[in-house]
């Protein structure tokens, strides 16, 4: 069966899944999640921690680990990948952390497979399936991370030096304070690349019925407000306000 012509890869519906695949592979090399921590023990310093999509941490892991010992809270130790740290018995087990790269590589490979679809019909079906599957995969990953944070914050070491700390759930995003430790969680560069990749897949899905290319993007953006109003049934569309057929085809 013949594949798509080379010129077709300039179309947004084929090009963007390939770009998204590249971004997802690069994202694996960067921290997905960052934590900044302030404590009285380090009055002139903000400690930082980076967590990756596989069992690896970077930054001030040793110092932050020592602080967490005061309240009996332990991050999962990266016991499967190097660089490694001495595993603590109190740390929760997160075996699925090692499978993180498979999710990114799998979604990236799917993007390449979809872009190579031999027919337009199969391309459209592939874009539908990929977007749904991508949202499902990363939605499950986010839910799993939040559950593991809940688990870690509700299995505090009862023999910790600071007694009486109430169980807590660190948020994926935002600040929280426990005892004399204040932490702020945010996305890392890898997460932002992942969000951008998902955004590209959304755009590719929206363009699944269009032969628009990158060169058509400025015209599409100029005609987008009229196209949105037309689809929403707001106002009356005149002949001079016809939406760009590259979007609606």
Image (cartoon, rainbow, N blue to C red):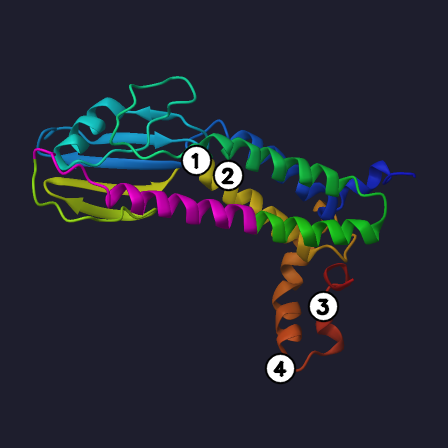
- Left or right position of 76 against 132: left
Dot 1: within a 10 Å radius of its alpha carbon, few (fewer than 14), some, or many (20 or more) residues?
some
Visible in this render: residue 212? Answer: no
Q: Position of residue 74 (x, y in %)?
A: 25, 33
* Discs 2, 1 touching: Cβ within 8 Å: yes
Visible in this render: residue 156? Answer: yes
Quarter the N terminus occupies: top right
The residue lying furthest to the bottom in this view is 236
Q: CA distance from mark 2 to mark 1?
A: 6 Å
Magenta range is 136-161
Dot label at residue 235: 4
Quarter the C terminus occupies: bottom right
Dot label at residue 193: 2
Q: Residue at x 73, y 49 (%)?
A: 126
User: Which residue in the structure is indicated by mark 1?
Assistant: 189
| Principal secondary structure, stretch drawn in magenta | helix
Q: Nearer the viewer, residue 4 or 154?
A: 154
Which element type, helix, strand or loop, lies under badge 4? loop
Q: CA distance from mark 3 to mark 1?
A: 37 Å
* Discs 4, 1 touching: Cβ within 8 Å: no
Q: CA distance from mark 4 to mark 1?
A: 42 Å
- Left or right position of 112 against 53: right
Q: Position of residue 144 (x, y in %)?
A: 42, 45
* Discs 3, 2 touching: Cβ within 8 Å: no
User: Which residue in the structure is indicated by mark 3?
Assistant: 243
Which element type, helix, strand or loop, lies under badge 1? helix
Q: Residue at x 73, y 73 (%)?
A: 240
N-terminal of the pair, mark 3 or mark 2, is 2
Q: Quadrant of residue 15?
A: top right
Confirm whether the magenta stretch covers residue 144: yes
């Amino acid at each position: 069966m013949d594949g798509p012509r080379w010129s077709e890869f300039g179309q947004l519906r084929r090009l963007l899944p390939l770009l998204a695949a590249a971004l997802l592979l690069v994202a694996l090399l960067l921290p997905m999640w960052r934590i900044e921590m302030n404590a009285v023990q380090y009055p002139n310093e903000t400690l930082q921690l980076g967590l990756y999509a596989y069992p690896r941490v970077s930054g001030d892991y040793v110092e932050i680990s020592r602080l967490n010992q005061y309240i009996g809270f332990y991050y999962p130790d990266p016991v499967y990948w190097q660089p490694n740290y001495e595993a603590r018995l109190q740390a929760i087990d997160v075996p699925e952390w090692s499978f993180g790269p498979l999710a990114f590589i799998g979604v990236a490979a799917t993007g390449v497979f979809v872009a190579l679809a031999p027919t337009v019909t199969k391309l459209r079906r592939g874009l539908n399936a990929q977007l749904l599957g991508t949202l499902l995969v990363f939605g499950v990953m986010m839910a799993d991370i939040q559950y593991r944070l809940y688990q870690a914050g509700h299995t505090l070491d009862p023999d910790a030096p600071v007694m009486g700390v109430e169980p807590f759930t660190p948020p994926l995003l935002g600040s929280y304070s426990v005892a004399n430790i204040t932490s702020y969680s945010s996305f890392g560069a890898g997460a932002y690349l992942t969000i951008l990749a998902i955004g590209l897949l959304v755009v590719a899905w929206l363009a699944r019925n269009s032969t628009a290319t990158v060169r058509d993007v400025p015209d599409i953006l100029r005609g987008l407000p009229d196209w949105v109003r037309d689809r929403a049934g707001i106002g009356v569309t005149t002949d001079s306000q016809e939406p760009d057929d590259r979007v609606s085809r």
